[in-house]
Amino acid sequence: MSRFNSLNTACMPIVMSWLLVACGGGGAGAPASSTISPVPSGPVSIAVAGGVGPTSAAAGSTVEVWATVPAKTEIVMRWSGATLTSDEEEWHATLSVGTTQVSVRAERQVMDQVFETLSYSAPTSVVKTARLYVPPSPRGLILFLHGTGGNSNFIESAEARYVALKAISKGYAVLAPEAEESKAGDLDGDGKPRWNVPLSIGNVDLQSVDALLASLYSTGRLPANLPQFALGMSNGGSMVVALGAVAASSQAAVFPRLRFKAVVSYCAQGRADAVSLTTTPTAWYLCGNDDNIEVSNSNAQANSTALGARGVPTQAMLHPATPLFDDRFMRVAGINSAQSRAMSAEFRTAGWVDSTGFFNKPSSDIAALAAAAPAVFPMLASLTQTQQREVFAQISVMRAEHQMFSDWASRTLRWFEAYR
Protein backbone atom coordinates (compact mmCIF):
# COMPACT_ATOMS: atom_id res chain seq x y z
CA MET A 1 0.00 0.00 0.00
CA SER A 2 1.25 3.44 -0.87
CA ARG A 3 2.14 5.77 1.96
CA PHE A 4 0.74 8.67 -0.05
CA ASN A 5 -2.73 9.56 1.26
CA SER A 6 -5.07 10.55 -1.53
CA LEU A 7 -8.58 11.86 -1.31
CA ASN A 8 -11.25 10.26 -3.43
CA THR A 9 -12.89 13.35 -4.86
CA ALA A 10 -15.64 11.36 -6.49
CA CYS A 11 -17.21 10.78 -3.09
CA MET A 12 -16.11 14.02 -1.39
CA PRO A 13 -18.91 15.52 0.70
CA ILE A 14 -19.18 19.27 1.04
CA VAL A 15 -18.36 19.06 4.74
CA MET A 16 -15.35 16.98 5.63
CA SER A 17 -13.25 16.38 8.68
CA TRP A 18 -10.23 14.35 9.64
CA LEU A 19 -9.20 12.36 6.67
CA LEU A 20 -11.90 10.16 6.57
CA VAL A 21 -13.94 9.56 3.53
CA ALA A 22 -14.37 6.07 2.27
CA CYS A 23 -16.38 5.19 -0.81
CA GLY A 24 -18.25 1.97 -0.42
CA GLY A 25 -19.82 -0.03 -3.09
CA GLY A 26 -19.24 -2.95 -5.30
CA GLY A 27 -20.50 -3.76 -8.71
CA ALA A 28 -22.43 -6.75 -9.89
CA GLY A 29 -20.51 -9.87 -10.70
CA ALA A 30 -18.96 -10.29 -14.15
CA PRO A 31 -21.17 -11.92 -16.80
CA ALA A 32 -20.64 -15.62 -17.27
CA SER A 33 -19.21 -14.99 -20.74
CA SER A 34 -16.48 -12.64 -19.47
CA THR A 35 -12.88 -13.60 -20.02
CA ILE A 36 -10.69 -12.95 -17.01
CA SER A 37 -7.05 -12.27 -17.81
CA PRO A 38 -4.59 -14.23 -15.67
CA VAL A 39 -2.52 -12.21 -13.21
CA PRO A 40 1.12 -12.21 -14.29
CA SER A 41 3.32 -14.40 -12.16
CA GLY A 42 6.24 -11.99 -12.42
CA PRO A 43 6.60 -8.23 -11.98
CA VAL A 44 4.97 -5.81 -14.40
CA SER A 45 7.30 -3.29 -16.04
CA ILE A 46 6.74 0.43 -15.49
CA ALA A 47 7.89 3.25 -17.76
CA VAL A 48 7.86 6.83 -16.45
CA ALA A 49 8.53 9.67 -18.88
CA GLY A 50 9.39 13.07 -17.48
CA GLY A 51 9.80 11.65 -14.02
CA VAL A 52 10.90 8.71 -11.94
CA GLY A 53 9.34 5.72 -10.24
CA PRO A 54 9.94 1.99 -9.82
CA THR A 55 10.85 0.12 -12.99
CA SER A 56 8.56 -2.78 -12.07
CA ALA A 57 5.99 -3.82 -9.48
CA ALA A 58 3.52 -6.59 -8.76
CA ALA A 59 0.25 -6.58 -10.69
CA GLY A 60 -2.54 -4.99 -8.67
CA SER A 61 -0.18 -2.89 -6.55
CA THR A 62 -0.05 0.88 -6.24
CA VAL A 63 3.22 2.74 -6.75
CA GLU A 64 4.44 6.30 -6.38
CA VAL A 65 5.84 8.41 -9.23
CA TRP A 66 7.47 11.82 -9.14
CA ALA A 67 8.04 14.35 -11.90
CA THR A 68 11.62 15.59 -12.12
CA VAL A 69 10.70 19.25 -12.35
CA PRO A 70 12.75 22.13 -10.93
CA ALA A 71 10.26 23.47 -8.40
CA LYS A 72 10.97 27.14 -9.13
CA THR A 73 10.73 27.06 -12.93
CA GLU A 74 8.48 24.17 -14.01
CA ILE A 75 5.18 22.62 -13.02
CA VAL A 76 3.34 19.42 -13.87
CA MET A 77 0.17 20.16 -15.78
CA ARG A 78 -1.04 16.56 -15.59
CA TRP A 79 0.03 12.93 -15.80
CA SER A 80 -1.10 11.00 -18.85
CA GLY A 81 -1.12 7.30 -19.60
CA ALA A 82 -1.73 4.86 -16.77
CA THR A 83 -4.67 5.03 -14.39
CA LEU A 84 -3.79 7.29 -11.47
CA THR A 85 -5.10 6.70 -7.98
CA SER A 86 -4.40 10.30 -6.96
CA ASP A 87 -4.80 13.77 -8.46
CA GLU A 88 -3.45 13.71 -12.02
CA GLU A 89 -2.19 17.30 -11.71
CA GLU A 90 0.14 16.80 -8.72
CA TRP A 91 3.88 16.49 -9.32
CA HIS A 92 3.91 13.52 -6.93
CA ALA A 93 1.25 10.95 -7.75
CA THR A 94 0.29 7.30 -7.35
CA LEU A 95 -0.81 4.90 -10.05
CA SER A 96 -2.29 1.44 -10.32
CA VAL A 97 -0.28 -1.40 -11.78
CA GLY A 98 -2.33 -3.55 -14.11
CA THR A 99 -1.50 -6.81 -15.83
CA THR A 100 0.48 -5.32 -18.71
CA GLN A 101 3.27 -2.79 -18.98
CA VAL A 102 2.42 0.51 -17.28
CA SER A 103 3.40 3.72 -19.05
CA VAL A 104 2.88 7.20 -17.63
CA ARG A 105 4.11 10.63 -18.66
CA ALA A 106 4.45 13.89 -16.72
CA GLU A 107 3.18 16.69 -18.95
CA ARG A 108 5.28 19.67 -17.89
CA GLN A 109 5.20 23.41 -18.43
CA VAL A 110 7.93 25.99 -17.95
CA MET A 111 6.87 28.74 -15.54
CA ASP A 112 9.53 31.42 -15.11
CA GLN A 113 7.38 34.27 -13.81
CA VAL A 114 9.14 37.03 -11.90
CA PHE A 115 7.29 38.37 -8.86
CA GLU A 116 7.20 42.11 -8.43
CA THR A 117 8.46 43.48 -5.12
CA LEU A 118 6.27 46.18 -3.56
CA SER A 119 6.98 48.44 -0.60
CA TYR A 120 4.21 49.45 1.76
CA SER A 121 4.01 50.85 5.27
CA ALA A 122 0.40 51.38 6.33
CA PRO A 123 -0.76 51.61 9.04
CA THR A 124 2.65 52.35 10.63
CA SER A 125 5.88 53.89 9.40
CA VAL A 126 7.57 50.48 9.22
CA VAL A 127 8.36 49.74 5.57
CA LYS A 128 7.40 46.19 4.61
CA THR A 129 7.66 44.35 1.30
CA ALA A 130 5.20 42.22 -0.60
CA ARG A 131 5.59 39.98 -3.63
CA LEU A 132 2.94 40.21 -6.33
CA TYR A 133 2.12 38.61 -9.65
CA VAL A 134 -1.04 39.43 -11.55
CA PRO A 135 -1.81 37.45 -14.74
CA PRO A 136 -4.09 38.91 -17.42
CA SER A 137 -7.74 38.88 -16.30
CA PRO A 138 -7.12 37.07 -12.98
CA ARG A 139 -9.81 34.68 -11.73
CA GLY A 140 -9.03 35.37 -8.10
CA LEU A 141 -6.33 36.40 -5.63
CA ILE A 142 -4.44 34.05 -3.31
CA LEU A 143 -2.47 35.37 -0.34
CA PHE A 144 0.66 33.44 0.72
CA LEU A 145 1.57 33.98 4.38
CA HIS A 146 4.96 33.10 5.83
CA GLY A 147 5.66 31.48 9.18
CA THR A 148 7.58 32.60 12.28
CA GLY A 149 10.84 34.35 11.41
CA GLY A 150 9.85 34.59 7.76
CA ASN A 151 8.99 37.38 5.36
CA SER A 152 7.60 37.86 1.88
CA ASN A 153 10.47 35.77 0.45
CA PHE A 154 8.43 32.77 1.62
CA ILE A 155 6.75 32.69 -1.77
CA GLU A 156 10.18 32.27 -3.41
CA SER A 157 11.04 29.12 -1.44
CA ALA A 158 10.93 25.98 -3.58
CA GLU A 159 7.75 24.42 -2.19
CA ALA A 160 5.73 27.64 -1.80
CA ARG A 161 6.81 28.96 -5.20
CA TYR A 162 5.67 25.73 -6.85
CA VAL A 163 2.20 26.17 -5.34
CA ALA A 164 2.20 29.80 -6.50
CA LEU A 165 3.19 28.83 -10.04
CA LYS A 166 0.39 26.26 -10.14
CA ALA A 167 -2.01 28.98 -9.02
CA ILE A 168 -0.75 31.35 -11.73
CA SER A 169 -1.18 28.61 -14.34
CA LYS A 170 -4.85 28.45 -13.32
CA GLY A 171 -5.26 32.19 -13.75
CA TYR A 172 -4.88 33.38 -10.15
CA ALA A 173 -3.01 36.44 -8.95
CA VAL A 174 -0.72 35.78 -5.97
CA LEU A 175 0.33 38.13 -3.20
CA ALA A 176 2.80 37.52 -0.38
CA PRO A 177 2.69 40.23 2.33
CA GLU A 178 4.72 40.13 5.50
CA ALA A 179 4.12 40.56 9.20
CA GLU A 180 4.93 43.85 10.93
CA GLU A 181 7.41 42.03 13.17
CA SER A 182 9.33 40.69 10.18
CA LYS A 183 10.70 44.22 9.76
CA ALA A 184 10.04 45.92 13.11
CA GLY A 185 11.35 43.10 15.28
CA ASP A 186 9.77 41.33 18.23
CA LEU A 187 7.13 43.88 19.22
CA ASP A 188 5.26 41.76 21.76
CA GLY A 189 8.37 40.38 23.47
CA ASP A 190 7.59 36.71 22.90
CA GLY A 191 10.96 36.17 21.23
CA LYS A 192 9.39 35.21 17.90
CA PRO A 193 8.92 37.70 15.07
CA ARG A 194 5.68 36.63 13.42
CA TRP A 195 2.08 37.46 12.56
CA ASN A 196 -0.12 38.91 15.28
CA VAL A 197 -3.02 36.45 15.21
CA PRO A 198 -5.69 37.60 17.75
CA LEU A 199 -8.89 39.12 16.35
CA SER A 200 -8.81 42.70 17.60
CA ILE A 201 -9.29 46.17 16.14
CA GLY A 202 -5.78 47.12 17.22
CA ASN A 203 -4.12 44.18 15.46
CA VAL A 204 -1.50 45.90 13.30
CA ASP A 205 -1.23 42.95 10.92
CA LEU A 206 -4.96 42.88 10.21
CA GLN A 207 -4.76 46.63 9.63
CA SER A 208 -1.72 46.21 7.38
CA VAL A 209 -3.13 43.47 5.14
CA ASP A 210 -6.45 45.30 4.85
CA ALA A 211 -4.67 48.53 3.87
CA LEU A 212 -2.40 46.76 1.36
CA LEU A 213 -5.37 45.15 -0.37
CA ALA A 214 -7.27 48.44 -0.38
CA SER A 215 -4.30 50.16 -2.04
CA LEU A 216 -3.92 47.49 -4.72
CA TYR A 217 -7.59 47.71 -5.63
CA SER A 218 -7.83 51.50 -5.51
CA THR A 219 -4.78 51.95 -7.77
CA GLY A 220 -6.04 49.41 -10.28
CA ARG A 221 -3.26 46.88 -9.68
CA LEU A 222 -6.00 44.37 -8.95
CA PRO A 223 -9.37 44.40 -10.71
CA ALA A 224 -12.38 45.03 -8.50
CA ASN A 225 -14.34 42.24 -6.84
CA LEU A 226 -11.76 39.47 -7.15
CA PRO A 227 -12.60 36.35 -5.14
CA GLN A 228 -9.97 36.22 -2.38
CA PHE A 229 -8.31 33.18 -0.84
CA ALA A 230 -5.42 32.67 1.57
CA LEU A 231 -2.95 29.98 2.50
CA GLY A 232 -0.28 30.11 5.16
CA MET A 233 2.46 28.01 6.66
CA SER A 234 2.85 27.50 10.42
CA ASN A 235 2.18 30.88 12.12
CA GLY A 236 0.97 32.00 8.70
CA GLY A 237 -1.46 29.08 8.81
CA SER A 238 -2.87 30.37 12.09
CA MET A 239 -3.11 33.82 10.55
CA VAL A 240 -5.17 32.65 7.56
CA VAL A 241 -7.65 30.98 9.93
CA ALA A 242 -7.95 34.39 11.63
CA LEU A 243 -8.32 36.15 8.27
CA GLY A 244 -11.13 33.77 7.42
CA ALA A 245 -12.87 34.58 10.70
CA VAL A 246 -12.82 38.38 10.31
CA ALA A 247 -16.05 38.50 8.29
CA ALA A 248 -17.98 36.82 11.13
CA SER A 249 -16.33 38.84 13.91
CA SER A 250 -17.30 42.09 15.60
CA GLN A 251 -14.37 43.71 13.75
CA ALA A 252 -15.76 42.96 10.28
CA ALA A 253 -16.68 46.56 9.47
CA VAL A 254 -13.21 47.77 10.48
CA PHE A 255 -11.49 45.50 7.95
CA PRO A 256 -13.69 45.62 4.84
CA ARG A 257 -11.08 44.06 2.53
CA LEU A 258 -10.55 40.98 4.68
CA ARG A 259 -13.15 38.78 3.03
CA PHE A 260 -12.06 35.33 1.93
CA LYS A 261 -13.90 32.62 0.04
CA ALA A 262 -11.74 29.80 1.50
CA VAL A 263 -8.44 29.34 3.34
CA VAL A 264 -5.84 26.59 3.78
CA SER A 265 -3.70 26.28 6.91
CA TYR A 266 -0.49 24.32 6.40
CA CYS A 267 0.96 22.88 9.61
CA ALA A 268 -0.98 24.96 12.13
CA GLN A 269 -4.17 24.44 14.10
CA GLY A 270 -5.25 28.09 14.44
CA ARG A 271 -6.55 29.94 17.48
CA ALA A 272 -9.70 28.74 19.21
CA ASP A 273 -11.37 32.17 19.06
CA ALA A 274 -11.02 32.32 15.28
CA VAL A 275 -12.18 28.71 14.84
CA SER A 276 -15.26 29.36 16.98
CA LEU A 277 -16.32 32.30 14.78
CA THR A 278 -15.33 31.48 11.24
CA THR A 279 -17.84 30.61 8.56
CA THR A 280 -15.15 30.49 5.86
CA PRO A 281 -14.41 27.07 4.30
CA THR A 282 -11.19 26.02 6.01
CA ALA A 283 -8.79 23.18 5.19
CA TRP A 284 -5.95 21.96 7.38
CA TYR A 285 -3.10 20.29 5.48
CA LEU A 286 -0.84 18.88 8.14
CA CYS A 287 2.58 17.26 8.37
CA GLY A 288 2.28 13.67 9.57
CA ASN A 289 5.43 13.88 11.74
CA ASP A 290 5.24 17.56 12.67
CA ASP A 291 8.12 18.30 15.06
CA ASN A 292 7.08 21.82 16.07
CA ILE A 293 6.04 21.81 19.74
CA GLU A 294 3.56 24.64 19.09
CA VAL A 295 1.60 22.58 16.58
CA SER A 296 -0.95 19.94 17.51
CA ASN A 297 -2.36 17.83 14.71
CA SER A 298 -5.00 16.50 17.09
CA ASN A 299 -6.11 20.06 17.86
CA ALA A 300 -6.32 20.79 14.15
CA GLN A 301 -8.43 17.66 13.78
CA ALA A 302 -10.70 18.84 16.57
CA ASN A 303 -11.02 22.26 14.97
CA SER A 304 -12.03 20.72 11.67
CA THR A 305 -14.54 18.49 13.43
CA ALA A 306 -16.00 21.53 15.19
CA LEU A 307 -16.43 23.38 11.90
CA GLY A 308 -18.06 20.38 10.31
CA ALA A 309 -20.50 20.13 13.20
CA ARG A 310 -21.51 23.74 12.50
CA GLY A 311 -21.96 23.06 8.79
CA VAL A 312 -18.83 24.93 7.70
CA PRO A 313 -17.03 23.18 4.80
CA THR A 314 -13.75 21.77 6.10
CA GLN A 315 -10.97 19.27 5.54
CA ALA A 316 -8.17 18.04 7.77
CA MET A 317 -5.56 15.80 6.18
CA LEU A 318 -2.18 14.41 7.17
CA HIS A 319 0.62 14.44 4.63
CA PRO A 320 2.77 11.36 5.28
CA ALA A 321 6.50 10.79 5.02
CA THR A 322 7.66 9.85 1.53
CA PRO A 323 10.73 7.96 0.31
CA LEU A 324 13.82 9.42 -1.32
CA PHE A 325 14.15 9.21 -5.08
CA ASP A 326 17.59 10.05 -6.34
CA ASP A 327 16.56 13.06 -8.45
CA ARG A 328 14.66 14.66 -5.56
CA PHE A 329 17.11 17.50 -5.04
CA MET A 330 16.60 18.77 -8.58
CA ARG A 331 13.75 20.69 -6.98
CA VAL A 332 16.41 23.03 -5.59
CA ALA A 333 17.45 25.78 -7.99
CA GLY A 334 20.81 25.09 -9.64
CA ILE A 335 21.01 21.38 -8.77
CA ASN A 336 21.03 19.00 -11.74
CA SER A 337 20.33 15.28 -11.92
CA ALA A 338 23.97 14.21 -11.53
CA GLN A 339 24.43 16.37 -8.44
CA SER A 340 21.16 15.17 -6.91
CA ARG A 341 22.05 11.53 -7.47
CA ALA A 342 25.52 12.05 -6.00
CA MET A 343 24.04 13.61 -2.86
CA SER A 344 21.47 10.84 -2.56
CA ALA A 345 24.32 8.32 -2.73
CA GLU A 346 26.18 10.21 0.02
CA PHE A 347 23.11 10.06 2.27
CA ARG A 348 22.54 6.37 1.57
CA THR A 349 26.19 5.52 2.20
CA ALA A 350 26.01 7.37 5.53
CA GLY A 351 23.18 5.06 6.57
CA TRP A 352 20.62 7.86 6.80
CA VAL A 353 18.19 6.18 4.39
CA ASP A 354 16.59 2.89 5.38
CA SER A 355 15.99 -0.17 3.21
CA THR A 356 12.57 1.14 2.13
CA GLY A 357 13.98 4.49 1.02
CA PHE A 358 12.90 6.65 3.98
CA PHE A 359 15.21 8.99 5.88
CA ASN A 360 15.74 7.58 9.37
CA LYS A 361 17.07 10.70 11.10
CA PRO A 362 15.56 14.15 11.66
CA SER A 363 16.63 16.68 9.05
CA SER A 364 18.23 18.85 11.75
CA ASP A 365 20.44 15.93 12.85
CA ILE A 366 21.43 15.23 9.26
CA ALA A 367 22.36 18.88 8.73
CA ALA A 368 24.53 18.91 11.87
CA LEU A 369 26.25 15.63 11.07
CA ALA A 370 26.95 16.66 7.48
CA ALA A 371 28.34 20.03 8.59
CA ALA A 372 30.69 18.26 10.99
CA ALA A 373 32.17 16.04 8.26
CA PRO A 374 32.16 17.97 4.96
CA ALA A 375 34.86 15.76 3.46
CA VAL A 376 32.52 12.76 3.70
CA PHE A 377 29.84 14.64 1.74
CA PRO A 378 31.77 16.36 -1.07
CA MET A 379 28.76 16.98 -3.32
CA LEU A 380 26.69 18.46 -0.51
CA ALA A 381 29.66 20.56 0.64
CA SER A 382 30.12 21.95 -2.89
CA LEU A 383 26.72 23.65 -2.81
CA THR A 384 26.03 27.20 -1.71
CA GLN A 385 24.65 27.71 1.79
CA THR A 386 21.27 28.61 0.32
CA GLN A 387 21.21 25.39 -1.69
CA GLN A 388 22.24 23.34 1.34
CA ARG A 389 19.40 24.85 3.37
CA GLU A 390 16.96 23.92 0.63
CA VAL A 391 18.35 20.38 0.44
CA PHE A 392 17.70 19.95 4.16
CA ALA A 393 14.24 21.49 3.67
CA GLN A 394 13.55 18.80 1.06
CA ILE A 395 14.60 16.12 3.56
CA SER A 396 12.28 17.72 6.10
CA VAL A 397 9.42 17.50 3.58
CA MET A 398 10.21 13.83 2.92
CA ARG A 399 10.14 13.13 6.64
CA ALA A 400 6.81 15.03 6.96
CA GLU A 401 8.34 17.33 9.56
CA HIS A 402 7.20 20.92 10.11
CA GLN A 403 7.79 22.11 6.57
CA MET A 404 5.82 23.62 3.70
CA PHE A 405 5.15 21.02 1.02
CA SER A 406 3.88 21.26 -2.56
CA ASP A 407 2.68 17.68 -3.07
CA TRP A 408 -0.87 18.95 -2.60
CA ALA A 409 -0.65 22.09 -4.74
CA SER A 410 -3.46 20.92 -7.00
CA ARG A 411 -5.54 19.84 -4.02
CA THR A 412 -5.15 23.30 -2.52
CA LEU A 413 -6.36 24.92 -5.73
CA ARG A 414 -9.28 22.51 -6.02
CA TRP A 415 -10.28 23.52 -2.50
CA PHE A 416 -10.28 27.17 -3.53
CA GLU A 417 -12.02 26.46 -6.82
CA ALA A 418 -14.88 24.75 -5.00
CA TYR A 419 -15.78 28.06 -3.33
CA ARG A 420 -14.77 30.63 -5.95
Image (cartoon, rainbow, N blue to C red):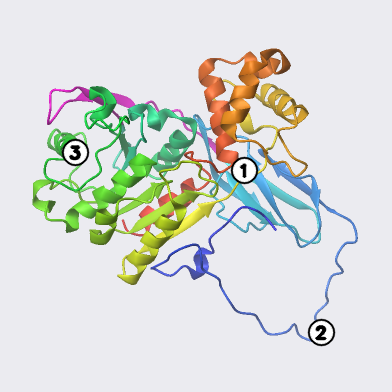
Depicted 328 relative to depicted 53: above or below: above
Quadrant for the C terminus in the image: bottom left
**Cα gap from disc 2 to disc 1, whole angstroms:** 38 Å
Furthest-left residue in this view = 253
Query: Label 3 amino acid?
Result: Leu
Corner quadrant of residue 92: top right
- The residue that mark 3 highlights is 213
The disc, 3 or 1, on the residue closer to the chain's N-terminal end is: 1
The location of residue 113, given as percent across then percent down, is 41, 29
Residue 331 seen in render: no
Quadrant for the N terminus in the image: bottom right
Q: Which of the pair 76/347 is nearer the observer?
A: 347
Furthest-bottom residue in this view = 32
Corner quadrant of residue 156: top left
Q: Which of the pair 32/132 is nearer the observer?
A: 132
Query: Label 2 amino acid?
Result: Ser
The disc, 2 or 1, on the residue closer to the chain's N-terminal end is: 2
**Cα gap from disc 3 to disc 1, whole angstroms:** 37 Å
**Cα gap from disc 2 to disc 3, whole angstroms:** 65 Å
Helix, strand or loop for disc 2: loop
The location of residue 287, given as percent across then percent down, is 51, 47
Q: Crowding at label 1, few (<14), some or many (≥20) Cα neighbours within 10 Å?
A: many
The location of residue 289, given as percent across then percent down, is 55, 46
Q: Is residue 345 magenta?
A: no
The location of residue 203, given as percent across then percent down, is 16, 40
Helix, strand or loop for disc 3: helix
- The residue that mark 2 highlights is 33
Q: Which residues are magenta?
A: 108-131
- The residue that mark 1 highlights is 106
